[in-house]
Image: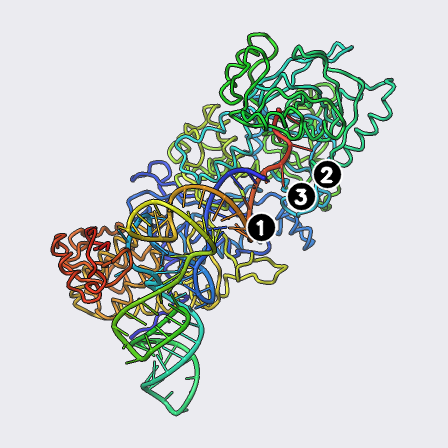
Amino acid sequence: MAELSLPQIEAKWQARWKEAGLYKANLDAPEKPKYYNVTMFPYPSGDKLHIGHWYNYAPVDTWGRLMRMKGFEVFQPMGFDSFGLPAENYAIKTGVHPAETTRKNIDKMKEQIGAIGGMFDLDLNLETSSPEYYKWSQWVFLQLYKKGLAYRKEAPVNWCPSCQTVLANEQVQDGHCERCKSEVIHKNLTQWFFKITDYSEKLLDYEGLEWPEKTILMQKNWIGRSEGVNFKCKLKWFDHEFEVFDSVPQTFKAQTFSVIAADHPLLAKIMKDHPLEKEVMACADRISKKRMAKRFEVDEDMDGIFTGHYIENPYGTGDLPLWVASFVLMDYGSGIVNCSAHDERDFAFAKKYGIPLHPVMFPEDPVEAEKVKNLEYCYHHADEGVLMEPEEFKGRRWGEARKDIIAHIEKTGMGKRVINYRLRDWLISRQRYWGAPIPIVYCDKCGEVPVPESDLPVVHPHVEDYVPKGTSPLAGAPDFVNVKCPKCGEAAKREVDTMDTFVCSSWYFLRYPDAQNSKEAWSKKRADTWLPVDMYIGGPEHACMHLLYARFIHKVMHDAGLVDAKEPFKRLVHQGMVTKDGAKMSKSKGNVVSPDEFVAKYGSDVFRMYLMFMGPFTEGGDWNDRGITGVARFVDRFYRAMQTEGSGEGMDKVVHQTVARAGQAMEKMNFNIAVAAMMELTNAMLQTPLNKGQKELVLRLLAPLAPHLAEEVWEMLGHKESVFNESWPKANPEFLVNDTVTYAVQVNGKLRATVELAAQATKEDALAAARAEANVAKYIESGVKKEIFVPGKIIGFVV
RNA sequence: GCCUGGGUGGUGAAAUGGUAGACACGCGAGACUUAAAAUCUUGUGGCCGUAAGGCCGUGUGGGUUCGAUUCCCACCCCAGGCACCA
């Protein structure tokens, strides 16, 4: 019997598929219903394709092939996110220019992706660092600029001292740089921002999206919508009015003091020439420094001082003394907060500095109420708390009274209803070399001038010194910097910062269907043919970065009438992580598994099936060098069974039941179960070889999981056409019903016997058969209280 | 602290109210072989028993149910996310 060498036959099939155009979709006019199957595109790194890529792409391809066989026109493109820090850092490390390393790494990765044998369309040549692409990234910037959604301002920003660049809030994790893990510090800089906050409310609408609940929750949490009231306040002795946000305005009568952020610009103004100036500003400085230097602990680092100023009688309960406090944030609300006995932080602060408190809400239990009155503890967020003030709401419950109190506040003119968000604008400037230049020119006469669309692209200059120094390396290219103002023609200077790479990756799915378009970023017709992405697969780490940015940019484009789809990604799935001996793979731990050697030894089909067999796709799995041999054995056994001529007598049942079971598992992306079902079937096939028709059914079922193997055997059976032109097999219901059923017989819920009964057996037959079992009879001698019969499953007695 | 997941044999895991451990790795025994590898057959949750069978067993403790890995309550542990947001 012929032996199979997958590594030898795979190249043949990859070449044939390419020749036949298996992965080419008819982009202008799909003949079948379209299916846009996308994986988050990789950045080209020197580490080449690692196991995480495979764990992503192999199942994506299996899914795409399944959809193809289910009758869809599948478009499964692949490109490269080739601008950005990973490519640049690799270049710095190797001392080779990023343009060169990027080129080399992309070519290598294309070869490796090709070796997967997927339906990925790599001929689109979508690379974010090519002028053909970044021209349109700059165009996207200009669209936002036109709508006032791109603006420049000076602000305290996150600075990574190691990457020598600013970072967006989303790229700071736990106070550290998302990329290099260095501690992030704060700096005041003038930078470009995208006004994502204008889309806060729109981004909270997930209607029609099939996304993991967890991811939606993470985004909602990040956007941080909060309903409340803005109270009108006035600073005593100054002509300064402002608003103070309160998300729980029910207890407004309890406010007894006010706090201001240490870095609030107002603070220096009101303290100027004040007797307390020195002390207060010293305290503010201390707080600011501490906050910037390290991760802030609310309790440990609580600090503050009285400013000598007051907020003028906002609630009719007298003036509120204004304190500087360490727990107030400058960039949420107005940076000034009014404080009460019903907030834990306020309570703790007041206790520490001896500031009077005035509780207005109490527990029903009089003993507890007395404790609250005596300020023994902070009583907060209690729906059933009884309000004593204001007079109009005396006796009402805290939770239930909220709406009426807000209405009362609005009516009396004390304040008005507002919604606050935690989301901040997206800082897109980067002081790094390997990114798309921001298409802006600064002119002494005209100020900030956008580059006209007809002048795009602003070509990314070649510089030899691209090592980051804190200012953009682009500033070192005089030919790039010095230009004529597009408006007045006078000498002007270009913006030298580059765009965050996340800008480039926020719209690539719009470009894919029309990747060669040199006249527009995309044609609306093609975008409307293919968008939204039907299935988007990638890691969960992008929940509040790429996935949020892409939705924002897409919605801006939608609002500009450039694409009909409201959302970019209809369905989203996150793959799990591959571990080694339960630990994350990392170079420092030295436990990295290199796919190439396993693919060379066993073939792509074995490798990809093992990845899918390891565990549930969305949960990941643990890599084991030995485990892959199980799949290799399965492939050998399968091939052997397929070469054996047989009658297949009595096998229709098991074949069709596998079609049903594995088919369902595939559709639910439970690839591990599908592979296991195929293994079980193979074990049965070795006992009773199948006939040709049965074999064909099985091959269609296996095809998305092991495309090369299926194709090879399909050809062996005498077929000239690809198995991927076949349809996805359906089980014949006739074979899904069994003549007999094994019933479990339980006495008091404990298994005592099993009985084989005809599928049609009645309750009476079943009970009688069960009673006849010796091991059942001995347990039910004492008399049966209740009989249970679940057709097809269980016979039970309660004694 | 808060929000998500999750905790099942030696290992990866399956089962979402109905025979716990499918499938696979590993391990034991046997066949083939001069031998080994590969392959094939067979066994494999723990304890008692020659066996039939019994008892225990899905993080811990309670509950609902004839019956719970699955549902409910409390707690412990692990992973991920958020974390002064007034």
Q: Secondary structure at mark 3?
A: strand
Tags 2 and 3 in contact by the CB under 8 Å rule?
no
Q: Position of residue A617 (x, y in %)?
A: 42, 52
Q: Secondary structure at mark 2?
A: loop
Identify the amino acid type marked 1. Answer: Arg
Q: Give the label, 1 or 3, closer to the camera.
A: 3
Q: Secondary structure at mark 1?
A: helix
The image quadrant where one finds the C terminus of chain A is bottom left
Identify the amino acid type marked 2. Answer: Glu
Q: Which numbered circle lies on residue A176?
A: 3
Q: Quick one: label 2 or label 3, which is nearer the N terminus?
A: 3
For the question of whether residue A10 can be seen, the reply is: no
Q: Is residue A209 left or right of residue A640?
A: right
Q: Nearer the viewer, residue A254 or A78?
A: A254
Tags 2 and 1 in contact by the CB under 8 Å rule?
no
Distance between the Cα atoms at labels 1 and 3?
30 Å
- State how the image is colored: rainbow
Residue for badge 2: A300
Residue for badge 1: A103
Q: Position of residue A478 (x, y in %)?
A: 74, 36
